[in-house]
Amino acid sequence: MASHSNDSLESFVKIPTIKFTKLFINGEFVDSISGKTFETIDPRTGEVIARIAEGDKEDVDLAVKAARHAFDDGPWPRLSGAERAKRMMKFADLIEQNVEELAALDTIDAGKLFSMGKKVDIPHAASVIRYYAGAADKIHGEVLKMSNAFHGYTLREPIGVVGHIIPWNFPTTLFFLKVAPALAAGCTMIAKPAEQTPLSALYYAHLAKLAGIPDGVLNIITGFGPTAGAAISSHMDIDAVSFTGSTEVGRVVMKAAATSNLKVVSLELGGKSPLIIFDDADVDMAAQLALIGILHNKGEICVASSRLYVQEGIYDKLVAKLVEKAKAWVVGDPFDPKVQHGPQVDKQQFEKILSYIEHGKKEGATLLTGGKPLGEKGYYIEPTIFAEVKEDMLIAKDEIFGPVLALAKFKTIDEAIRRANSTRYGLAAGIVTKDLNVANTVSRSIRAGTIWINCYFAFDNDCPIGGYKMSGFGRDFGLEALHKYLQVKSVVTPLYNSPWL
């Protein structure tokens, strides 16, 4: 089985003292109005890390008031793009100066690999801020060639006060995929991190203040979805809401937006992404992509390649290689540099994944490896691979959000396309082939927002990601994301005696 390393939780790194546990409103850390707090839990042990202020509707009202004032009367939207960029660059520098501590916070809160946080997640957050800082002084409309005697042009103006509702699987990355473009656009905002992972967001609020982001521009409300999240979605004075999370909650957010003030909504929701491996693939490379595609971040990633389709010619060879790799995969304390995969985020997620594994067994899929929890404490699960999975099985239909792979064999390109599309989701897909014609045909036939050919998780600041179908709408990354936080205004004036139209 996958090995489990969990001998000494404290031996690899010094756990940081938790400095910020209160709400951040109008540039100050404050208690919630109710005085209530909730526990944030270390998934490595199930023990409490700290008590965090529990924000509710009244706290959201205060934060919105601060953000509204900062937008209507404050300097941020009125600064030149170059000046906003300067402060954002300083924010990015401060993040890089605190990499160790920030990575440790996401490890103890979300069970994420410390080495990955230090090397990838936290430095990437700084690079996302710099990317959008670079766009802050390049926001412009266009001159229109009107057909009548008018001069017309468009302006792109900040949309106003934005609510960001952030999930727990990438607490830092997804915080900045929302906050950075909104800052560049000149918006003010209220961010609600997931209740499982509030620690790094509060630290970022502190760094934003140090970077010279004016009071009221970035407010953080920690709390729960049905209370704080609902208050953001239904608030009459929030102009746009951006949500990343499950399709079920996405529906609730959209409904709240519709029944309140028709705020603009952007949703990045669930996925059940297929990875299709053709007979001509390099077996070693394909097996490695398939492994990473489902086990990266312990499967808690919306674009995970949780459905694997392998063409019959290399099926046996590829599956043998994949199972061998999965059995050698090291699960354990995410602070241990040898570990490849930490605990699931919390008890609820842990139990949900295990219940799907039971469904897979009951429905007749063949369990090739894994399928059990690991260790005496903490929320660790073995890498799990099911074969002979049919499209109507729950493990093929539902987003499990854990290290569980549904594997099937296919004969023809047409069958692969049909099976890849037989899902209510459409977030991403992967194709492994050496044949350019196959790659072109399949990539254009799959209804999904991102298609990776001979690679997987190939994210880039300039490359938009987002969903088709029930995976939502709106894009993160790229200039597409910046445009979510901008309104287009058309300005028209008459032309008199102009030599040209």
Image (cartoon, helix red, strand yellow):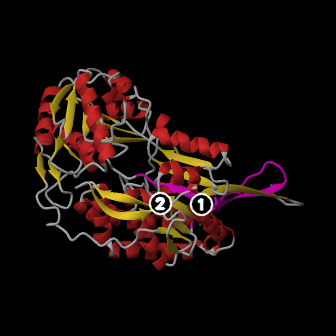
Amino acid at the residue labelled 1: Glu
Q: Which residue is mark 2?
A: 54
Q: Is residue 169 above or below residue 48?
A: above
Vertical arrangement, residue 182 with respect to residue 355, above or below? below
Q: Secondary structure at mark 1?
A: helix
User: Which of 88/416 is in front?
Assistant: 88
Q: Position of residue 365 (x, y in %)?
A: 23, 24
Measured from the top left, where is residue 77 in percent x and y? 63, 69
Quadrant of the rendered structure where residue 391 is?
Answer: top left
Q: Is residue 421 above or below residue 432?
A: above
Q: What range of the chain is rendered magenta?
A: 138-167
Q: Residue at x 41, y 68 (%)?
A: 21
Q: CA distance from mark 1 to mark 2?
A: 11 Å
State the SS at label 2: loop
Amino acid at circle 2: Glu
Please state, as top left, top right, bottom left or bottom right, where the N terminus lies in the image. top left
Vertical side of 130 occupied by 439: above or below: above
Q: Nearer the viewer, residue 71 or 32?
A: 32
Residue 58's tag is: 1
Give whichever of 90, 69 is nearer the camera: 69
Q: Residue furthest front?
A: 35
Residue at x 33% of width, y 66% of height: 123
Dot 2: within a 10 Å radius of its alpha carbon, few (fewer than 14), some, or many (20 or more) residues?
Answer: many
